[in-house]
Image (spheres, rainbow, N blue to C red):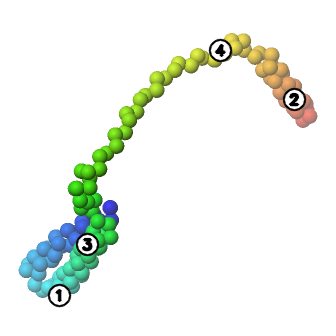
Amino acid sequence: MPKQQFKSQADICKKSLDILHKAIEMDPDNAEEYQAGIAYTECVMKASNAIVKAFDVVEPPKTATPKDKTEDVAKEEKPKRTRKTKTAKEPVPVDSKPATDETQSVVESSVEENADLFAMFGD
């Protein structure tokens, strides 16, 4: 992806150069300023193009592979994936009896503890 970014940068520089040249024609009083912008933009454009070329040298494009090799080597066909059928699991039976004994004893003990707590402070 960085290579594409530098290509884009070079394109932007090219458009900027056109604008700077038109600006010199329309506003010759600031030509010196525009010339500095042109010099800078040309340097950036040259650097961007050099980086793009460097990418081509270091990482050659994939389309540059010889076609003879790709035609001779047959691609191995991958076996098609088969989907496993879902097996329905039987639901686990749930006890229909609520555990009232356990909850009642917990509630009663907490009420007794609270009563003792308030008794400590008095009325």
Instruction: Say which residue label 3 marks.
Output: 53
Q: Amino acid at mark 3?
A: Lys
Tags 4 and 3 touching, CB below 8 Å: no
* Element carrying mark 2: helix
Tags 4 and 1 touching, CB below 8 Å: no
Q: Nearer the viewer, residue 122 or 20?
A: 20
User: Which image quadrant for residue 89?
Assistant: top right
Instruction: Say which residue label 2 marks.
Output: 113
Q: Residue at x 26, y 76 (%)?
A: 50
Q: Choose the circle earlier in sequence order: 4 or 1.
A: 1
Q: Amino acid at mark 4?
A: Pro
User: Is 86 left, or right, of 104 in this rendering?
Assistant: left
Instruction: Say which residue label 4 marks.
Output: 93
Front label number (2 vs 4): 4
Instruction: Say which residue label 1 marks.
Output: 32
Which quarter of the figure is the C terminus placed in?
A: top right
